[in-house]
Image: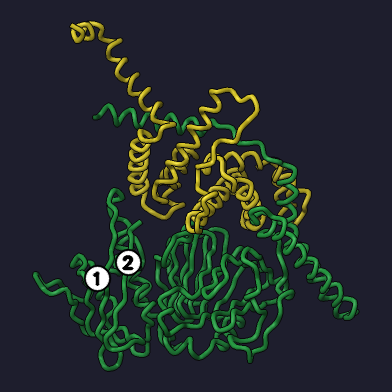
Chain colours: A green, B yellow
């Protein structure tokens, strides 16, 4: 048996050596260089042309406007052509940029505020805000403000838009949903290896060289690794809060104090959030940043997770977790989806670093009983979970007021990675 | 960093297309090799190489010259490949995109030995795809790219001990899977056979006793 293991390992080493000494295929280096340089310098030229056109508009507005229009039209044609001729569409289509001004505009009266209509963007399209902050709008769903120089790529369109931030800083306002669809992430933004998933909130994301800064003005977002199926699992940030994450994988680096003076664009964006968004997930702006939700969901056994646990397990007790004295969190209203994300974050923190040889799956119905003012009075898992998990993760919900009926339930399905 | 390279980086940072082109020409083979080692023969290879250089251009402003350019580039490229793989795994898979099922590209007059090697490598990449993301990443970074566990721990954001544990299980799992993969089982058997022969050769008396 020992010998078999030895030969297995030696075989693996042989293959590693073969891969290390393998010769990569010959590519069409010239074409690749041309394409890459075009993609790199398209963005720069578009931005530069846009700047010079803007100054030209000041002098000869008629001529400047037609040049801008021609440039924008050319960019759009290139995108369309790219889509038509690109085999898999990635190489040509994805790397062409269009300036945001090429999109139709919307007035404030059309819902989700003023900005450029984003629903017509093709999947794979990349959009640049060249010189001024610009706003992309998915009516009734979300609005994304791009700082000058920011580039976003549309990964998926539909009821729950999915974008990737390739460069720069964006602020997002996402309308929270109150029906059954609230369980689904309403808006997803990938930043390198980081995924920021939202149910209804206002936040900003900045991409830096090796880290991503996420600042949540109000509501709750989940930040975790991108590229995984199903709900995002990671650190929960509840506004107002700010934290940095590894660009490569969404690992929390540190929690940070809120910016002393939020940028005007953030502040103005927040003012334009539809009232519906703030009714379910907002915090009073003068309230100190509560860390409970965020720190409780920090992965890799953050000790604050266990300190959030309010109750010792009674031997042989029922799977109900009894309510402790609720912490003072008046005014905080969570949606069911945020409550679910909180639980999943807690489970992932606990289970993801367990023995990698074991595959752990949690599947349970969570039944909640709420008090008169919406505070969680009892949490029951059916079937019950491991007692310590029940205590730690179920306990997180106490002191939270939910925007939900007095008896409510949801499913939690979680696979440890 | 050499003066010439430093000059190229500085000029590319300021938007000089010619300088960036020179950087591309100097390093594209290095990046392609890395992507090929980590991904195998993938239809996305060119896209990934292109994405690496886009990322390099975006991040040139952050390169301060404390590290060698090639080291910095390697790090950027590794991150891009890892992100690409994660994205690819999350997107719905079309039948024609199934990883690793593509046979090695036919090459004219390719010697059998080289073809066998390509088959083995393609099969090994298929097995790598079956590992969990966490195990595969540390395996690729350590075994294929030669990064130290401490560096990997920083990159993936976990303790060094966890990296070592994942490596241990990744090797073990791959070894077991190799036995079931037709293109690789022969290699395992061959190594097992040589293990058996070695003691016989060193202890002829014992072998004779066994025969009797």
Q: Mark 2 lies on which chain?
A: A
The disc placed on residue A392 is 1
Q: Is mark 2 on a helix, strand or loop?
A: strand
Number of marks: 2
Q: Looking at the image, can residue A257 be seen?
A: no
The image shows residue A10, relative to residue B164, as above or below, that is above
User: Which corner quadrant holds the C terminus of chain A?
Assistant: bottom left
Q: How far apart are marks 1 and 2 (CA)?
A: 17 Å
Q: Looking at the image, can residue A390 be seen?
A: yes
The disc placed on residue A70 is none
**In which quadrant of the rendered view does residue A40 lie?**
bottom right
Query: Circle 1: is it few (<14), some (14-19), or many (20+) Cα within 10 Å?
Result: many
Residue A10 x, y percent position in the rendering: 37, 29
Residue A65 x, y percent position in the rendering: 85, 77
Residue at 44% over, 90% down: A279
Residues at marks 1 and 2, common chain? yes
Q: Camera-side residue: B90 or A211? A: B90
Q: Which chain carries label 1?
A: A
Q: Camera-side residue: A306 or A373? A: A373
Q: Given the current orientation, which residue lies at the most extreme bottom position?
A: A372
Q: Name the residue under label 2.
A: A413
- Say whether residue A217 is left or right of residue A137: left
The image shows residue B79, relative to residue A398, as above or below, that is above
- Say whether residue A377 is left or right of residue B158: left
Q: Given the current orientation, which residue lies at the most extreme front position?
A: B95
Residue B155 x, y percent position in the rendering: 46, 52
The image shows residue A32, relative to residue B61, as above or below, that is above
Q: Which of marks 1 and 2 is in front?
A: 2
């Amino acid at each position: 048996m020992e010998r078999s293991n030895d030969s297995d390992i030696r075989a693996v080493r042989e293959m590693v050596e073969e891969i290390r000494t393998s010769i990569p295929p010959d590519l069409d280096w010239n074409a690749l260089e041309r394409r890459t340089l075009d993609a790199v310098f398209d963005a720069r030229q578009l931005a530069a042309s846009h700047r010079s056109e803007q100054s030209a508009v000041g002098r000869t507005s008629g001529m400047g406007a037609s040049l801008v229009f021609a440039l924008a039209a050319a960019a759009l044609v290139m995108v369309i052509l790219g889509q038509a001729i690109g085999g898999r569409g990635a190489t040509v289509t994805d790397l062409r940029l269009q300036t945001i001004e090429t999109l139709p505009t919307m007035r404030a009266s059309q819902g989700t505020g003023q900005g450029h209509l984003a629903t017509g963007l093709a999947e794979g399209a990349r959009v640049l805000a060249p010189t001024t902050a610009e706003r992309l709008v998915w009516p009734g769903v979300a609005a994304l403000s791009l700082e000058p120089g920011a580039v976003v790529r549309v990964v998926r369109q539909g009821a729950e838009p999915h974008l990737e931030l390739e460069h720069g800083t964006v602020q997002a306002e996402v309308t929270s949903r109150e029906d059954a669809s609230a369980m689904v992430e309403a808006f997803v933004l990938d930043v390198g290896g980081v995924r920021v998933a939202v149910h209804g909130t206002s936040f900003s994301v900045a991409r830096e060289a090796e880290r991503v800064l996420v600042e949540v003005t109000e509501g709750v977002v989940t930040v975790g690794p991108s590229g995984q199926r199903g709900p995002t699992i990671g650190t929960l940030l509840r506004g107002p809060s700010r934290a940095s994450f590894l660009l490569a994988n969404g690992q929390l680096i540190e929690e940070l104090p809120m910016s002393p003076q939020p940028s005007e664009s953030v502040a103005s964006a927040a003012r334009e959030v539809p009232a519906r968004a703030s009714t379910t997930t907002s915090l009073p702006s003068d309230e100190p940043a509560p860390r409970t939700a965020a720190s409780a969901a920090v992965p890799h056994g953050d000790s604050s997770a266990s300190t959030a646990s309010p109750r010792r397990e009674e031997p042989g007790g029922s799977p109900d977790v009894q309510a402790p004295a609720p912490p003072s969190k008046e005014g905080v209203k969570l949606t069911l989806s945020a409550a679910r994300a909180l639980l999943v974050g807690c489970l992932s923190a606990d289970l993801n670093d367990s023995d990698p040889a074991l595959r752990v799956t949690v599947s349970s119905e969570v039944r909640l009983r709420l008090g008169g003012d919406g505070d969680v009075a009892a949490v029951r898992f059916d079937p019950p979970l491991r007692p310590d998990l029940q205590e730690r993760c179920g306990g997180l919900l106490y002191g939270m007021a939910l925007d939900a009926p007095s008896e409510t339930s949801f499913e939690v399905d979680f696979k440890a990675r | 960093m050499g003066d010439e390279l430093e000059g190229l980086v500085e000029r590319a940072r300021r938007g000089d297309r010619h300088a960036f082109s020179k950087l591309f020409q100097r390093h594209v083979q290095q990046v392609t090799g890395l992507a090929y080692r980590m991904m195998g023969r993938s239809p996305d290879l060119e896209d990934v190489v292109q994405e690496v250089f886009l990322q390099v251009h975006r991040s040139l402003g952050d390169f301060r010259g404390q590290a060698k350019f090639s080291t910095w580039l390697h790090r950027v490229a590794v991150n891009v490949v890892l992100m690409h793989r994660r994205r690819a795994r999350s997107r719905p898979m079309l039948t024609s995109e199934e990883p690793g099922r593509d046979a090695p590209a036919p090459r004219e007059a390719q010697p059998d030995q080289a073809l066998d090697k390509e088959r083995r490598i393609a099969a090994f990449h298929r097995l790598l795809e079956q590992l969990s993301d966490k195990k595969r990443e540390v395996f690729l970074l350590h075994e294929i790219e030669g990064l130290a566990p401490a560096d990997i721990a920083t990159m993936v954001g976990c303790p060094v001990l966890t990296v070592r544990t994942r490596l241990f299980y990744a090797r073990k799992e791959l070894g077991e899977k190799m036995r079931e993969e037709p293109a690789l089982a022969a290699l395992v058997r061959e190594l097992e056979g040589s293990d058996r022969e070695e003691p016989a050769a060193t202890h002829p008396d014992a072998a004779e006793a066994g025969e009797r």
